[in-house]
Each structure stands twice: as structure tokens, then as C-alpha cells.
Amino acid sequence: PAIFFDLETSDLSPVGQILNYCFTLVDGDWKVLDQISDSVAISRLQLPRAGAIKANRINVLEHQKLCTLGEAAAMKKIHSFINRAVADLGPGTVRLVGYNSARFDLDYLRTSLIRNGLNPYFKVKYKDLLLVSRKLSVSETRFPRVSSGDEAGRLSLRLETLCKALGILDGKQLHESSDDVRLTIELARYYADEFGVDVRSFEPFEASKWVNKG
């Protein structure tokens, strides 16, 4: 089982605030078992970055009108959701999976939990689908090779780029957490079906079994 998650935020730095989130629990056959998704009211102590608002396509005034959940309540909800899944399925059996989550979403989640007095560590295994994309980009001839446009000769491994190239996404990525989680699950399932690499069991450090743990 795995919890796929995504966060849309007010800043690139993890000291910012989560604006909306989605956590989706799936079983071994990719069937959705449970999900939480919500928007979070922006604190008066936060000044969202213009670039983040543009990327998330959020109308701040409308966002504030529609939000009924503050950050403290949202963090309690997320914390309870993950811990409940661990309690039901067993410690160490649940994977927490995102796309580029190791460098961004996970730090954001932990910082937000700490800020609200909650333990940021769970008895789960952390996985990042971006690391699978990197592996496949150098090992599979059938893997999409789309230029990033930012740097000549560099491949784009963005979620939107890969989902478009593989026929998973038509149009533009919405940059809304529930939609991004759906895309991440579909891409993970595609990798498992077409390339035989399942993010839930993938180990990015392949030499680990030869490392002396004594």
C-alpha cells in the first residue's frame, strides 16, 4: 500500500505555507482506499510569493473566501490520516510517495507539522517517483526524451512533460494537488506496467545490498 501526496505552496522555501494538499491511499492493485484533499486558509503572517501564486493559478481573494480550514486544523487532519493508515496496515508497510517530494514536498510537510506541534516523522517508507524517472531515463530506450528547453541537451523530467509524452495528460497540468496526485499515480502505474519498475519497491541506491551494515 502507498499514500501518494502533493502539496501546492505559497513559497519555494519550506517556511512558507501549504495552500492545498491531497493524500491518496492506494492498495497493491492501485485501487483508491481513502483520500483527503483540502485548501488551507493563508495566515495573516504569510506573504505568498508572486511566482508561487502564478504557478498555482490561485486567486488569493477567492481562495480566502472559500477556505474554512486553517493551517493547524489541516496539519492535524494530515497527521491523523497518515497515522491511521500506518495503524491499520502496519508500521513500515505503507509508502509515502510524491513527485520530487524528497527535495520539496517532504521538507514542506515536516516544517508545517513542526510549526503546529506535531511529530513530523511517520513509520512509513519514503519514495520519490522522480528518482524512478531518472533511472528509466538512462536505462530504457523507450523512455521519452523531451528537451527541457532551459538548457541545451538536457532532458525534461517534469511530471507534466512525461505525462504528456506518454499520453497520460492532454493539455496543461493544473498544478492543483488532487490533480497532480492523480497524475503521479497514473505515471507510477505506467512505469510498473510498461517498464517493470514499481516506485513502491524501488531502491534508488542500488548498491545498498552490498554495503556492509556492520
Image (cartoon, grey):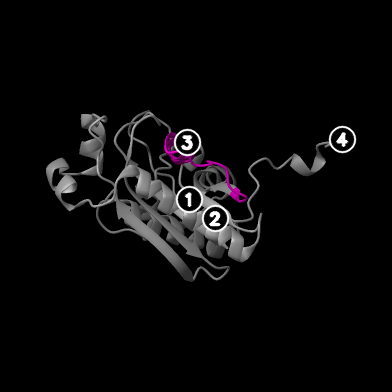
CB of mark 3 within 8 Å of CB of mark 4? no
Q: Determine the residue positioned at 47% across, 42% down.
A: 101
Question: Which mark is in front, 3 or 4?
Answer: 3
CB of mark 3 within 8 Å of CB of mark 2? no
Q: Which residues are magenta?
A: 105-125
Mark 3 vs mark 4, CA separation in Å: 33 Å
Earlier sequence position, callout 3 versus callout 2: 2
Give percent across and percent down for residue 133: 51, 46
Q: Determine the residue positioned at 15% across, 44% down.
A: 59
Q: Which quadrant holds the N terminus?
A: bottom right
Earlier sequence position, callout 4 versus callout 2: 2
CB of mark 4 within 8 Å of CB of mark 2? no
Up the image or down, 198 lies above or below 108; here it is below
Tag shown at residue 214:
4
Q: Secondary structure at mark 4?
A: loop
Mark 3 vs mark 2, CA separation in Å: 16 Å
Mark 4 vs mark 2, CA separation in Å: 31 Å
- Residue placed under numbered mark 2 in the picture: 83
Can residue 130 be seen? yes
- Residue placed under numbered mark 3 in the picture: 114
Q: Nearer the viewer, residue 74 or 15?
A: 74
Residue type for callout 4? Gly
Earlier sequence position, callout 4 versus callout 1: 1
Give percent across and percent down for residue 194: 54, 62
Residue 116 highlighted magenta (yes or no): yes
